[in-house]
Image: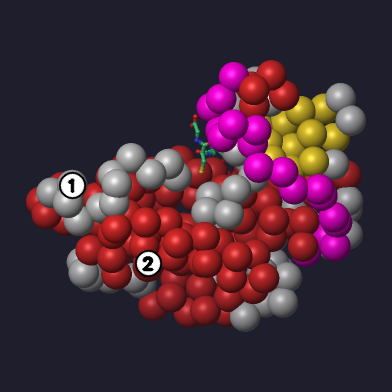
Amino acid sequence: MILYANEVSNFCAKVRIVLALKCVDAEERPPPDGYGSARFKAVAPLGTIPALVDGDLVLHESDVINEYLDERYPAPPLLPGDAAGRARIRLLTRFHDSHLEPPLRRLFAQMDPRRRDAAVAARGFADYQAQLARLAALGRFAPYLAGDRLTLADCAYPATLMLGDLMAAQTGIAVAKPAAVADWQARLAAEPGIAPALARARAGTLAWLAEQRRGPTDAAR
Ligand SMILES: N[C@@H](CCC(=O)N[C@@H](CS)C(=O)NCC(=O)O)C(=O)O
C-alpha cells in the first residue's frame, strides 16, 4: 500500500493514526510535484492528500480510507457495535471533516502576520470555538469520544485539535475549549498508538507556522 501524504496535513495524520493502531505499514510518498499537480492527478484523480493506493484501488478522503483500513485489517476493530453504534461513530468523524475542521482551514491565510486581518481572525476563531462547543454536546467522552472504546471517531481529532491550539497561539487569540474536550484531547495524546503521529504532525505544523511568520506569503500548505 502507498499512502500519499505530507508532514503538515491533519487529514494525513488522521490516517497515520489508524495505520499505527492497526500496526499496518504503508509506504509513504509525497504527492509528486505537490498535491493538485497534473503528475499527482495521473495517480490519484482528485489530487488531494491523503490518497491511498492498494493495488488497483485508489482512494481519496480520509474517512473513506480509514473505513477501508478498518475492514481490511479488522484488529483492533475501530468501527465496532451495532448499526446505531456505528452510525454514532460515523456522525462524529463526519462532524470533524464537515464542521470542526473547516473554520480552521479558512484561517490558514491569517497565520501570516503581514496578511492578518484582526477582525477576520477573531471571527474565524469564534466559529471554531462554536464548533468545539457543538462537539462537547455531541460526544460521550466516556472516556473516548463515542463511549468506552477507542474508535475511528477518536482518530479524526487529535491532529486537528493540536492544529487549532498552535494556530490560536500564533495569533494570540484565546479559544475557550470545553473541559470535556480538553481532557479527552490530553488522554488521546498519551495513547501509544496516537502519540507518534501527533508528534510528527506537530513538528510539521510548527515548521509551517514558522514559515508563515517569516514569509514569503505564498508558502504552500
Ligand atoms: N475531506 C478530505 C480533505 C483532504 C484535504 O483537504 N487535503 C488537503 C491537504 S490537507 C488537500 O489535498 N488540498 C488540496 C486540494 O484540495 O486540492 C479528507 O478527509 O481527506
Q: Is residue 202 above or below residue 38?
A: below
- The quarter in which the C terminus is drawn is top left
Q: Is residue 1 above or below residue 176?
A: above
Q: Main secondary structure of the magenta part?
A: loop
Label 2: which residue?
Answer: 166
211 horizontally vs 176: left or right: right
User: Which residue type carries mark 1?
Assistant: Arg
Q: Which is more toward the observer, 113 or 129?
A: 113
For the residues marked 1 and 2, what is the alpha-carbon distance in whole angstroms? 18 Å
Label 1: which residue?
Answer: 115
User: Circle 2 — which element?
Assistant: helix
Q: Bounds of the magenta span?
A: 21-38
Magenta stretch encompasses residue 125: no
Magenta stretch encompasses residue 34: yes
User: Circle 1 — which element?
Assistant: loop
Q: Residues within 10 Å of mark 1 (few under 14, many from 20)?
A: few
Q: Which is more toward the observer, 217 or 52?
A: 217
